[in-house]
Image (cartoon, rainbow, N blue to C red):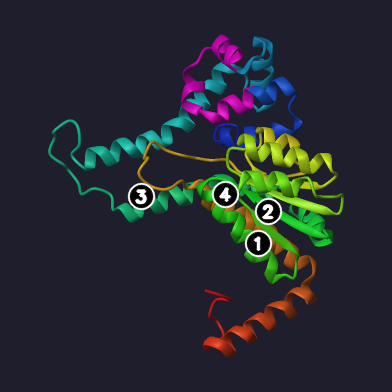
Amino acid sequence: MNTAADPARFDIVARIAQCVPDLRPAERDVAALILDDLAAAARASIGELAQRAGVSIASVTRFAKAVGCHDVRELKLRLAQAAAVGERFLRVAAAGAGEGDGKMRSEAPEPLATRVYDEIHAALARNHELLRQAPFAQAAAVLGAARMIYVFGMGGGSSALADEMRFRLVRLGRPVASYQDSLLQRMVASTLSPDCVVVALSVTGRVPELLDACRIARDYGAKLVALTAPASPLAALADWLVPIVASETDFIYKPSSSRYAMMMALDVLVTELALAQPEESRELLRRMKHTLDTHRGGGERQPLGD
């Protein structure tokens, strides 16, 4: 990993995620701990980091250097800066709303639409660099060759996006089914074979039921493409990892912005598949557009589906 390009400004969160595949197992445990709670990691001593991750102090030191920091002190400073971004905006918003300190507002509060947009934009920007290096071509190739594709997702965002991936793959003529129920996932996983592919969606990569289903699928020879956190147990199981890094703030009232990052990864993967079979994709999409326009009417630029 080249850290010399702009050593003063690199994004420590993205750097950790990029380095995960090349880290030693103990260093991956440190990465997982840090990515789970940046602020807590920034406050912890080197001994506390080692204890919480279940590794030696030497492993924490090696980890800091592996991700481009001179020492653990610099690592903690960068983590504190990364963690403070969300807190800074929250403090400004609270002051602008006149909460807590009783002071008169000096300026109008930020519109909620702007705040939601800014968090979505930050999540997409943070994941953009990771996705530029993800193995989309290889993952698309295995989807194109699969006898059957099964998409597993659980929870609010991943459940909805599992169906979204099914909708996208159907348009490209791929045999696909999506499952969100943990028992059904286990049942389906036990029927798979080496010519099948499981696409697992999980922002955290730590849902026990999903992990169990993916392990069962792997035991029966199925390939696994995971859209998930790079230092997670699910990432460790994957044949092809598309990394997703959550960037949540303390503003708990809005839905998670991380699902937009996962949708971006999903769109890139499906587009890669479409471009890998351009003639077939073009004809299938043309048929679909013709059928829909005949049914509902519509113009040339109307979206393909509602």
9 vs 90, left or right, is right
The answer to whether the residues at label 2 and label 3 have Cβ atoms under 8 Å apart is no
Q: Mark 3 falls on what kind of element?
A: helix
The answer to whether the residues at label 1 and label 3 have Cβ atoms under 8 Å apart is no
Q: Classify mark 4: residues with Cα within 10 Å, few (<14), some (14-19) or many (20+).
A: many
Question: Mark 4 highlights which residue?
Answer: 158
| Amino acid type indicated by mark 4 | Ser
Image depth: mark 1 or mark 3 in front: 1
Marks 1 and 4, the one that precedes in the sequence: 4
Marks 2 and 3, the one that precedes in the sequence: 3
In three-dimensional space, the C-alpha distance between marks 2 and 3, rounded to whole angstroms, equals: 32 Å
Question: Mark 2 highlights which residue?
Answer: 151
The answer to whether the residues at label 1 and label 2 have Cβ atoms under 8 Å apart is yes
Question: Mark 3 highlights which residue?
Answer: 115
Q: Is residue 243 visible?
A: no
Marks 3 and 4, the one that precedes in the sequence: 3
Q: Residue at x 48, y 32 (%)?
A: 82
Quadrant assignment, res 281: bottom right
92 vs 191, left or right, is left
Q: Position of residue 66 (x, y in %)?
A: 69, 25
Q: Residue at x 74, y 53 (%)?
A: 136
* Residue interval drawn in magenta: 30-52
| Amino acid type indicated by mark 2 | Val
